Amino acid sequence: MRSILIIIIMMMMIMLLSSCYPLDGNIESLKALRNSLITDTTRDPISRWFNPQISPCNWTGIKCENLIVVNIHLPCSVSPLNLPFPRPISQLKALKHLNLSHCAFSGEIYPEFWELENLQVLDLSDNRLSGKIPLNIGKLLKHLSQLVLDDNTFSGPLPASIGELSELEELSLRSNSFSGNLPQELGNLRLMRSLDISSNLFSGNAPPSLTNLTELLFFAASGNMFSGGVFQGIGKLTKLRFLDLSLNSFTGAIPSGIGNLKDLTFLNLQNCKFTGNVPEEVSKLSNLSYLNVAENDFSGELPSSMGNLQNLVYFIALNSGLRGGIPSDLGRCSKLKSIQLSFNSLSGTLPDSLSGLESIEIFLLSSNRLSGPIP
């Protein structure tokens, strides 16, 4: 009796799903997608991925639940398609995961696509897509946890409504042409763990609201046109492991609060126009393996306690306006493989402690005012 009841419940669930997403229509939409991708040049890979001899729900990269298509991940990295963005995808209303990366799709994305309200993961990276993100994206795709648009030609501002995507954990917009100021509303994304906005045309001050992203592990903003000071509350992002602010036009000094980021392993501040000193607080970043402060406008000395950076492997400070001597404490960084300090105004003699750096492979000191023997 119990088994019969379970069967009845399952049948009712299937009927409920089919009322929302007609089964035949769903499969027909999948077939329409296949047909839209077939050309003389794509016929071979498409016939392999979408073999008409087997059930559409068993096609390569397709996952169904009760005959409803919920996942699509085309294996385009092997066979790019070089086609316009496929329109039939917008008919698959139950889609949760969509990965069309490396497909070489081109052109603007039609408006109906952004109405796939069940999407949780959307990866359109490494295509030739253009246009703007819709202003109301936060109301259309409320369940998104990952949005990856890297390596396209999207443009325009980042809509303020993006702050309504309360479930978003990853936002990656690397290598596009997005522009304007970052919206304050980004600070509403409290679950964010990875934020990559590098290699765009963003400008203005980084909004102070970014300090609300206390779950952030990865933050890359290099290669933009940010100006003004780095938001002073950056020290609140204590879970950060990767921070890249290079190739911007910040003003002022590196915030001392950066010393609170104890989990950092990668810190790149190259060519940020920073002035003042490299703060002593940098020496508190004991997990750091990569530190790059090259091509800034410092006027002081290196921190005297750099020997605390026991995990440091790469230290780059070329052409940074550094003065004074090389701290002898640097000799305690026994894992160092690369020290690059050329084109500064460093003076004095080389500390004897540097002779103990047995892992060193690159040691650049040219164009300074150093003197005395080499240890």
Image (cartoon, helix red, strand yellow):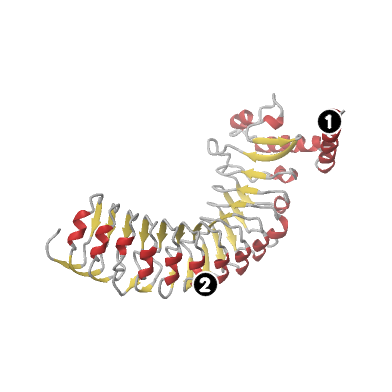
What residue is shown with label 1? 7
Above or below, 57 against 153 in this view is above
In the image: residue 194, left or right of residue 25: left
The quarter of the displayed image where residue 173 is located: bottom right
**Residue 282 in picture, x, y percent from top left:** 38, 66
Tag 1: Cα neighbours inside 10 Å, few (<14), some, or many (≥20)?
A: few
Mark toward the viewer: 1 or 2: 1
Helix, strand or loop status at disc 2? loop
User: Could you say which disc has been placed on residue 122 in the image?
Assistant: none
Image-quadrant location for residue 24: top right
Mark-to-mark CA distance, 1 and 2: 59 Å
* Residue at the extreme left: 373
- Taking the image as shown, residue 296 lies to the left or right of residue 20, namely left
- What residue did someone put label 2 on? 205
Quadrant of res 73: top right
As drawn, 127 above or below 341 = above
Counting from the top left corner in percent of width and height, residue 371 is at 14, 67
